[in-house]
Image (cartoon, helix red, strand yellow):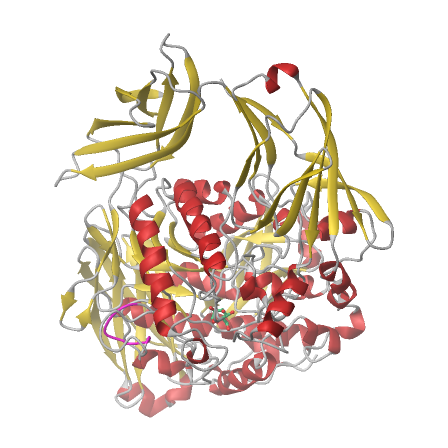
Amino acid sequence: MIETLSLDGTWTLKGPKKINIPAIVPGCVHADLHREKLIPDPYFRDNEKLVQWVGEKSWTYSRSFEASESMLERDRVLLRFDGLDTLAKVTLNGKVLAETNNMFREWEFDVKDRLKVGENTISIVFSSALAYGLDKQKERFLWQTGIGHHRLEGGQWVRKEQSNFGWDWGPMIVTMGIWRSVRIDAFDTAEISELLVKQSLSKAFKKAELEVEATVNLARRTKLSAFVTVSKDGAVVASGEAAVVRGKAKTSLTVKSPQLWWPNGLGEQPLYVVAVSLLDSEGEVISQSSKRIGIRELKLVREKDKWGESFCFEANGNRFFAKGANWIPSDQFDVWGTDERNRDLLKSSVEANMNMIRVWGGGKYERDDFYDACDELGICIWQDFMFACAAYPAFDDDWVANVKVEIEQQVKRIRHHACLAIWCGNNELEHISPILGDEPGQMPWDEYMNLFDKVIGKIVKRNDPQRDYWPSSEHSPVGDRKFSQNPDCGDAHLWKVWHGREPFEWYRTAYHRFCSEFGFQSFPEPSTIETYTNKEERNVTSYVMEQHQRSPIGNSAIIDYMLSWFRLPVGFDNTIWLTQILQGLAIKYAVEHWRMNKPRCMGALYWQLNDCWQVASWSSVDFFGKWKALHYAARNFFNPLLVAGVEDLDTDSVAIHVVNDLLEAKSLSINWKVVDVEGRELETGSKKIRAGANSTGVFKTLKLKKLVAKHGQRGLIVKLALKDGRKVVSENLVTFARPKHLTLEDPKLSVKVKKATRGSFDVTVSAKKPALWTWLELKGIDARYSDNFVHLMAGESQTIRVTPQIKTTAIAVKAALRARSVFDTYQEI
Ligand code: BMA
């Protein structure tokens, strides 16, 4: 069996200023310097500026290790790096072993003749990727977004996390280091180096054929065979054997009545383990490898239809509306973006009824645990390759050769995951006009197409033949490719709202087939802002807060849209919370429209799910995992059963839509309540409906001409509720007028706090008058809320389960508790 010596753990880091400190591998220089208090918290205030020097220098990681005689006697002794960020020179026992230049590649070196029994030394010199990129840019300029504002130049020359160089939501801190594990693997005879599992399901999904192909890394020629099992919860459901021929062992296995893997909201996520044991001629097991898979058919469907060409995903024969968001690195430094944090974010996305996450092309390929979590949670993955918003040196053969290995390795590493829905070539290289073209600094179309259509397309086809590949996001497959936002086909990045400053109503004019990016900004909550500012800096246009706002139009766009929808808030705290309410309203506007228009539109992935530091951004979950108002709204507008109203200002009517994403028809009832702004009920009603499986439709139109004539459009509020029996499964609110023009009265909110289970408290908030966007906040106590930013009509109350992150009492909760609604945001303090 294989013998492994891990070289993770404590190393030594040496660098400028005679720095010589302990270092932790995997990790990076900034994390090591920060741990040793040689640099301040890079995320506090404008400390980002104080740590720039680190990325401009070279740093050396070194350690010694013992190699045993038995290990060095093995047939093969391999030094393996899972990830070196990025430009590294590796020296073993004083002799240069290799130079590496790609953060996203695994590096393997035969060191059998380079090691000696006993103590060995290894050192790795990392040189500045920043300096390298800048030099290359001087040699030959390549266009990119954000130069001179939120991105350092030259990142496109280096196969490294592009957002490390800064983005319109992230700091410009270019790091380096041994960011993934290091080990020495030694073995005799052979090891299993790859496992490919192809699956085909019978028409009725009652039987699954699994083709298992194990690739063997031979150290010597001998007769080998492979024993393959497929098991579920430890019980073998199929097994088979195959001889190793020309380094491969192939066998087909049948799984009868397989438990199918489904995206979140459509079913469960049963996972099977495919395990292969490599046997030598004596039948001894000399190597083992296993992959956890989901048995399912998950594919992209592009068919001609009355609107053009569809772009939708299908799971086990069922087309589904993709609901989710775009994922960016969960920290500027990979080592700080832990598996635990990633899993918490993914759990938050499932709790918000998401079924798809796009791993965006300006970040990094995530760790195995990320994809494992998505398998377990039913989060389908749209996986970009790591190219974004820049022209790339595809004219450089060495660069292309380097990329080819990267793509192949990443495809082989991630391809077996049940969650993986599609590979995508890049982010926005066809969307942002200055990137492609024949002018200096641009990437010629033929070079672009050669790389993303041919080179990368072929590698995906060869190594993951059953998965769809999409050359770019956004991309229009029909008609003029230069028009990458064709509404009749492909996917689209819709930024007319926000970057284009169009009103939220613009969303209702957009009928694109699949919206893979659209977004609106907000600030993180006050308790998060307190972690990167001093008290006197808590104003959105203070120097420090502007350091944590990277969008060139950020603050002005937020305020502009805010004044178009809401009354001017009073005070910093109210302003911050109102930016979140506004963000939630914007994205709700978009998503509800596209869901009401399925199957014409079959996907809405908003920009962005998470943050990589504390910042004003498009995220719905902030850097500390705290849900913004948008994330609570997302849980409602992504709910498989959705009731939504579309007001018509010309006819004073409200069309009540019901969307059912479930694969079964549902007998439900729609309920409506029309009240005046003081909360008096003017009209109520309900209607039994049958919502077909995977359907959408208008089930009632409220004709409110008379009420409008009496109360005016500014005088009415319509509350909608969808019930499954007595259970409310979806609620919504419709007004003819914008909230700023509703003359709301003080809702006189009151709260009752009752101890609940496991350190939680049930807080019942009641309103005497309509209380729109009512939210709870525990001052000074971090907590999770089962809901927030709810609409309460007069006399209504709602109980919210509050779970403080620390052990505390009902009295302390009561004392720290604050209940507010949008009415409070503009009350003189
Ligand atoms: C799109 C994304 C990101 C960017 C976002 C907000 O371009 O692909 O590059 O952060 O818009 O501007």
Occupied quadrant, residue 486: bottom left
Asked if residue 227 lies left or right of residue 767, the reply is left
**Quarter-of-image position of residue 159:** bottom right
Q: Is residue 699 left or right of residue 280?
A: left
Q: Residue at x 36, y 73 (%)?
A: 445
Left or right: residue 660 compared with residue 124 = left
Residue 259 percent location from the top left of the image = 26, 34
Q: Is residue 726 visible?
A: no
Q: Does the magenta-highlighted stretch encompass residue 622? A: no
Q: Is residue 353 above or below residue 134?
A: above
Look at the image and give the residue range highlighted in magenta.
484-490
Give percent across and percent down for residue 27.
Answer: 67, 45
- Residue toward you, 495 or 84: 84
Q: Closest to the observer: 59 or 560?
A: 59
Return the residue nearer the eye: 297 or 262: 297
Residue in the image at 67% along x and 56% along y: 175
**Principal secondary structure, stretch drawn in magenta:** loop
How many marks do you count on the picture?
0
Where's residue 615, x and y in %? 63, 67
Q: Quadrant of the C terminus?
A: bottom right
Q: Is residue 137 above or below residue 89?
A: below
Residue 492 makes an appearance in the image: yes
Q: Using the image, determine if residue 648 lies above or below residue 472.
A: below
Of residues 576 and 58, which is closer to you in this image? 58
**Outermost residue, right side:** 18
Report x, y in % for residue 18.
87, 50
